[in-house]
Image (cartoon, rainbow, N blue to C red):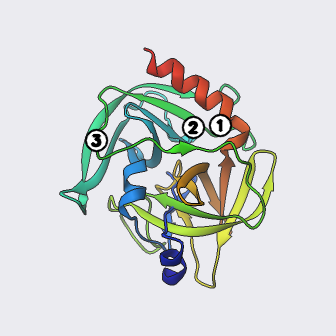
């Protein structure tokens, strides 16, 4: 798996709470992926998010717990990753997709956050693609979840792994490992980005859950218009 990631200049996956676990079978994220990806925390757990602007972050809607204060941060200090979280900003406003319903697993599990303080210059906005996912696509996944099911606690470390789309339908995608090794999301990876790599990293999906060693993701092409419109509204406030 490590050779495959190096050949493709790798990137990674994400999940949260009991809906998804950290990236299993993954390596430390490279500098490029670190610049696009952020941790989202609350008193009840942690998720992953992807940077759309210095004060705008995209994540999974189920990561937002009513009444809980959210913050964003990372584990990068002086160019290296540490276990201690660095809190960078509180979340000022959360906007879940209007059709999101926590009781309906088929509803769009997406939310956009507006931050109280802009992120440091080491973060840059990801490029959102309107391309639909197709069976056989190889994607780089990133996330702040556990590295294995045996971890009793999840340190704040960003990891990435290569996954392949095994099924794509109605704005959703199922992903699995590309090789024999087990790989996929774990707690803390929900909201983690999925990147397509064709000369540059483009954001095409978001991790939302795992089951039976498979990772379930939202295909962002189906919600491209809502993401762009909501980002513009929040940026103008």
Which residue is identified by label 1? Answer: 102
- Calculate the distance from the C-alpha at mark 3 to the C-alpha at mark 2: 26 Å
* Residue 182 vertical placement versus 208 (above, below): below
Which mark is on residue 121? 3
Q: Quadrant of the image for the N terminus? A: bottom right
Of circles 3 and 1, the one toward us is 3
Q: Is residue 33 in view?
A: yes
Local secondary structure at mark 1: loop
- Residue 135: where, in percent of width, then height? 78, 63
- Residue 218: where, in percent of width, then height? 67, 47
Of circles 3 and 2, the one toward us is 3
Which residue is identified by label 2? Answer: 61
- Calculate the distance from the C-alpha at mark 2 to the C-alpha at mark 1: 8 Å
Does label 2 or label 1 sit earlier along the sequence?
2
Does label 3 or label 2 sit earlier along the sequence?
2
Name the one closer to the observer, 94 or 20. Answer: 94
Identify the residue at the far top of this view: 237
Local secondary structure at mark 2: helix
Q: Residues within 10 Å of mark 3 (few under 14, many from 20)?
A: few
Q: Is residue 213 in view?
A: no
- Residue 90: where, in percent of width, then height? 32, 31
Does label 3 or label 1 sit earlier along the sequence?
1
Instruction: Say which residue appears at 52% left-offset and 26% top-offset.
Output: 231
- Residue 210: where, in percent of width, then height? 63, 60
Q: Mark 2 touching mark 1, by CB under 8 A? A: yes
Q: On the rendered structure, is 227 left or right of 99?
A: left
Q: On the rendered structure, is 67 left or right of 109?
A: left
């Amino acid at each position: 798996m490590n050779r495959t990631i190096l050949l493709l200049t790798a990137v990674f996956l994400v999940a949260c709470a009991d809906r998804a676990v950290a990236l299993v079978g993954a390596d430390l994220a490279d500098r490029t992926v670190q610049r696009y990806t952020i941790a989202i925390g609350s008193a009840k757990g942690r998720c992953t998010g992807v940077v759309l602007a210095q004060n705008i972050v995209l994540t999974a809607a189920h990561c937002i717990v009513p009444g809980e204060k959210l913050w964003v941060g990372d584990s990068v200090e002086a160019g290296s990753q540490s276990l201690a979280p660095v809190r960078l900003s509180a979340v000022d406003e959360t906007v879940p997709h209007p059709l999101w319903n926590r009781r309906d697993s088929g509803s769009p599990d997406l939310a956009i956050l507006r931050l109280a303080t802009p992120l440091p210059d080491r973060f840059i906005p990801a490029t959102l693609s309107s391309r639909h996912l197709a069976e056989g696509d190889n994607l780089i996944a990133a996330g702040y979840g556990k590295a294995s099911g045996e971890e009793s606690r999840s340190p704040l470390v960003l990891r990435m792994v290569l996954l392949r789309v095994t099924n794509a339908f109605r704005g959703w995608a199922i992903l699995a490992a590309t090789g024999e090794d087990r790989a996929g999301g774990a707690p803390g990876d929900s909201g983690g980005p999925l990147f397509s790599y064709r000369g540059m990293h483009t954001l095409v999906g978001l991790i939302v859950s795992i089951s039976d060693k498979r990772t379930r993701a939202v295909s962002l092409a189906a919600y491209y218009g809502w993401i762009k419109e909501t980002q513009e509204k929040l940026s103008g406030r």
